[in-house]
Image (spheres, helix red, strand yellow):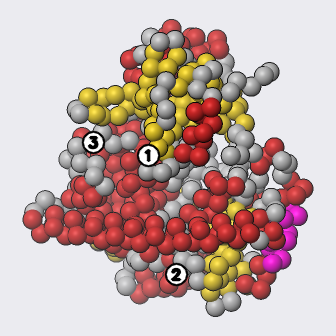
């Protein structure tokens, strides 16, 4: 098994102690809060108790006033408004949320979500023409459009007012639209730069409701949809993203929800559960995403737009939720097959696997799945990965990276290779002639050889704090609960305990996992070690004096909440 480097995350100890004293929380919670770079006790208090009142004024976003005035004018004059979304969870939830808000205000509004293979990614001139021909006088993009200069130009030519809302990185020059709302604009002083696409769309909703005098009354109704898109898009769960996720999850749990949301929750087996970020990210979001990956995103959009509670609406919602579940199962099956083929390529073909950047290609691989496959290759080999689907002489690729490698910067060193490319440091997409794939592999290998060291390619485990098993208390559990939801930017804390002993032989579950019973200083806990089955001999040979890295889980068992450990890693103490 590949060696894992444990990295102790530092903290401002004095600040952590001040937080613990000022908030009345255990010292370990104070330390965790200090690691989140919160400046004052009041900042930490707001972090533990996020509320909608902490959201920033939406009109601090450049372009917001123009956009809200134009949309409310269109509502008043009954001009047709079209919302152009994207086919992933962020784009679909953005589309649904903004459409519902405009409908509540009395707008004549429709939506369009492109299909991945038929329409391609982003805002296209042909789509502007299509929406204009259907009567749209105002078009609002959500989660896309920031680099759509050609589409903006076509909208101008047709006399359509285009409002772009997006969160992706802009070009040096913005599209010539009526308004461009993106906190990453260099001339935008908005304090929170890390909103998801649905977060930017939520600010538009907030501005519309605020200008209409209905914000306090209606805004909570839209936070739930924004939370799903925010958690699915893996943006940092700090600032406004944290508020959206925390308040939205509470709303989803408490209800009442729309027929579509209730059907989705039921199909995931989550009815009556306290929903957290795991439930959204790994159970609800994949079903929504499956529509855009495997068939048409309109299935997910229709489900999430269903509102009524009559029998026909509920029946339709359940049917759509089951359709999404079926699409997700089909996605999982195809994903497993492509992952297996890609791994064989890495492990058996030296021209692929011997390099620090993996470039794998397959004829006819499903383009809706290759992004997931790239992520799985990164997890398996801890190397940047580019996965390409080749069809009719063209290679469409999804790229994922590790923290030490700036993927977008690497692509920008070879723009002549691509028909199209774009993305972020850690994730990107490319399109190129299939004949140029060997050249892409060669040039990526050269960059990987010069920019990545052996240490960069070793997986790392962040250790947030020491916490002996005897120190686990109800107050610690409560403090961790208040720190959630966990995700990017606010990761679930990982603790270190040593020496720990294994007091029972590990039990293998489903041929992959280990169930353990661990003890330290007379305090014992059940623990789950996921995908640890290959380490059973090691644990049986080293049953005492172990150093444990773990996180804490609250599980329900026969109606009672039980605290268990989730094992991140285990090793014999390392000499310093």
Taking the image as shown, residue 247 lies to the left or right of residue 47, namely left
Position above or below: 514 against 361: above
> Where does residue 35 sit, x and y in percent of width and height?
61, 26
The residue lying toward the viewer, choosing from 315 and 309, is: 315
As drawn, the label of residue 58 is: none
Of residues 156 and 376, the one drawn nearer to the viewer in this rendering = 376
Disc 1 crowd rating (10 Å Cα; few below 14, some 14-19, many 20+) is some
Q: Are marks 3 and 1 in contact (CB under 8 Å)?
A: no
State yes or no: discs 2 and 3 in contact (Cβ < 8 Å).
no
In primary-sequence order, the first of circles 2 and 1 is 2
Question: In terms of depth relative to the viewer, which is nearer, 324 or 419?
Answer: 324
What range is drawn magenta here? 438-447
- Residue annotated with mark 2: 117
Residue that mark 3 sits on: 273
> On the image, which quarter does residue 272 sit in?
top left
Q: Is residue 540 left or right of residue 416?
A: left
First along the sequence among labels 2 and 3:
2
Q: Name the residue under label 1.
A: 509
Callout 2: few (<14), some (14-19), or many (20+) C-alpha neighbours within 10 Å?
some
| Residue 134 makes an appearance in the image | yes
Q: Where is residue 164 in the image (x, y as percent from the top left)?
A: 52, 65
């Amino acid at each position: 098994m590949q060696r894992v480097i444990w990295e102790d995350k530092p903290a401002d100890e004095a600040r952590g102690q001040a937080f613990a004293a000022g908030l009345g929380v255990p010292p370990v919670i104070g330390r965790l809060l200090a690691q989140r770079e919160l400046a004052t006790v009041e900042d930490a208090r707001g972090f533990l108790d996020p509320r909608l009142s902490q959201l920033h004024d939406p009109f601090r976003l450049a372009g917001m006033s123009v956009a809200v005035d134009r949309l409310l004018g269109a509502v008043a004059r009954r001009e047709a408004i079209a919302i152009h979304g994207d086919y992933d969870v962020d784009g679909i939830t953005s589309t649904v949320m903004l459409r519902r808000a405009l409908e509540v205000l009395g707008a004549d509004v429709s939506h369009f979500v492109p299909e991945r293979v038929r329409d391609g990614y982003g805002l296209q001139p042909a789509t502007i023409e299509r929406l204009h021909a259907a009567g749209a006088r105002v078009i609002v993009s959500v989660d896309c459009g920031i680099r759509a200069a050609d589409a903006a130009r076509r909208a101008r030519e047709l006399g359509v007012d285009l409002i772009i809302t997006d969160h992706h990185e802009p070009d040096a020059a913005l599209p010539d639209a009526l308004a461009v709302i993106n906190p990453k604009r260099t001339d935008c002083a908005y304090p929170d730069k890390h909103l998801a696409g649905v977060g930017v769309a939520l600010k538009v909703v907030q501005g519309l409701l605020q200008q209409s005098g209905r914000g306090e009354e209606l805004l909570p109704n839209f936070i739930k949809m924004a939370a799903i898109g925010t958690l699915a898009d893996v943006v940092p769960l700090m600032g406004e993203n944290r508020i959206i996720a925390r308040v939205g999850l509470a709303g989803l749990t408490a209800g009442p929800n729309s027929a579509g949301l209730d059907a989705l929750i039921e199909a995931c087996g989550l009815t009556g559960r306290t929903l957290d970020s795991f439930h959204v990210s790994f159970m609800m979001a994949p079903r929504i995403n499956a529509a855009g990956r495997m068939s048409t995103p309109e299935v997910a959009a229709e489900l999430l737009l269903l509102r009524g509670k009559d029998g026909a609406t509920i029946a339709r919602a359940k049917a759509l939720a089951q359709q999404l579940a079926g699409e997700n199962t089909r996605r999982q099956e195809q994903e497993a097959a492509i992952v297996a083929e890609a791994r064989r390529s890495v492990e058996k073909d030296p021209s692929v696997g011997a390099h620090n950047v993996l470039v794998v290609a397959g004829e006819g691989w499903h383009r809706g799945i290759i992004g997931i496959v790239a992520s799985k290759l990164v997890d398996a080999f801890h190397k940047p990965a580019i996965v390409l689907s080749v069809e009719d002489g063209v290679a469409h690729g999804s790229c994922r990276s590790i923290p030490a490698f700036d993927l977008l910067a690497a692509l920008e060193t070879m723009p002549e290779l691509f028909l199209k490319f774009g993305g972020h440091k850690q994730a990107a997409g490319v399109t190129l002639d299939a004949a140029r794939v060997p050249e892409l592999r060669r040039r990526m290998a050269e960059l990987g050889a010069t920019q990545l060291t052996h240490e960069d390619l070793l997986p790392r485990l962040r250790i947030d704090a020491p916490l002996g098993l005897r120190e686990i208390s109800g107050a610690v559990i409560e403090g961790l609960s208040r720190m959630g939801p966990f995700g990017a930017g606010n990761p679930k804390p990982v603790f270190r305990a040593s020496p720990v002993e294994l007091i029972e032989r590990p039990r293998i579950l489903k041929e992959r996992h280990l169930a353990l019973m661990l003890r330290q200083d007379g305090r014992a806990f059940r623990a789950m070690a996921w995908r640890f089955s290959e380490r059973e001999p090691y644990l049986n040979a080293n049953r005492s004096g172990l150093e444990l890295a773990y996180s804490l889980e609250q599980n329900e068992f026969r109606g009672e909440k039980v605290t268990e450990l989730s094992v991140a890693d285990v090793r014999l103490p390392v000499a310093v």
